[in-house]
Image: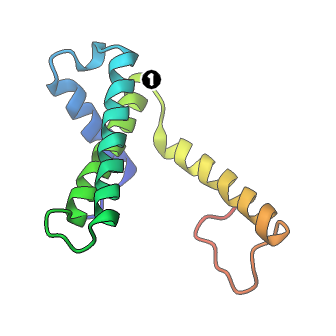
Amino acid sequence: MNIRVKDIHSMAKDVLDLTDDGWNRTIYYDISKLLEEAGETAECLTKQSAYPGKKEYKLEDLGDELSDVIIVCFIIAEKKGIGLDEAISRKQKKRIKKLLDRFHGGNYPEGFTPRVKI
């Protein structure tokens, strides 16, 4: 299943609409939730690298935690009226330009076909 940015926006709205006080929770709640999910992601990464191959540390678990981080980011964006599709595109263009300037003299390497053009 391919999920698009607008689909994740809809999922975030569902989370907010289905939570008793989702739209009214304070920014401090949102920050703590984002930090909680980021911490769980870090814990999952740490356990996987400390105990590679152990059955209880699956990539699926890491995927779940990363998904939680993404959804919380989209929830915050929805509450603040930020369209992350435009923000992600704008930021990626800045990131690519920075990398090209830093590592390639401002030009795409020969033979490289960019997926995002700046």
Q: In the rendered view, would you say 98 is above or below 17?
A: below
Query: Foreground: 35 or 118?
Result: 35
Q: Position of residue 100 (x, y in %)?
A: 75, 65
Residue neighbourhood size for the residue with mark 1, other residues' Cα within 10 Å, grouped as few (<14), some (14–19), many (≥20): few
Badge 1 marks a residue whose secondary structure is helix
Q: Which residue is mark 1?
A: 80
Q: Position of residue 106 (x, y in %)?
A: 83, 66
Q: Residue furthest bottom?
A: 111
Task: Tell me the residue at 24%/26% (across/down).
Answer: 16
Query: Foreground: 65 or 43?
Result: 43
Q: Residue furthest right?
A: 105
Q: In the rendered view, would you say 12 is above or below 108?
A: above
Can you see residue 7? no
Task: Tell me the residue at 39%/17% (across/down).
Answer: 27
Looking at the image, residue 81 sits to the left or right of residue 1; the answer is right
Q: Quadrant of the N terminus?
A: bottom left
- Where residue 80 sits, quadrant-wise, is top left
- Where residue 28 sits, quadrant-wise, is top left
Task: Tell me the residue at 25%/65% (across/down).
Answer: 59
Task: Tell me the residue at 21%/32% (across/down).
Answer: 15
Can you see residue 22? yes
Q: In the rendered view, would you say 113 is above or below 68?
A: below
Q: Position of residue 35 (x, y in %)?
A: 37, 33
Q: Position of residue 6 (x, y in %)?
A: 36, 46
Q: How many marks?
A: 1
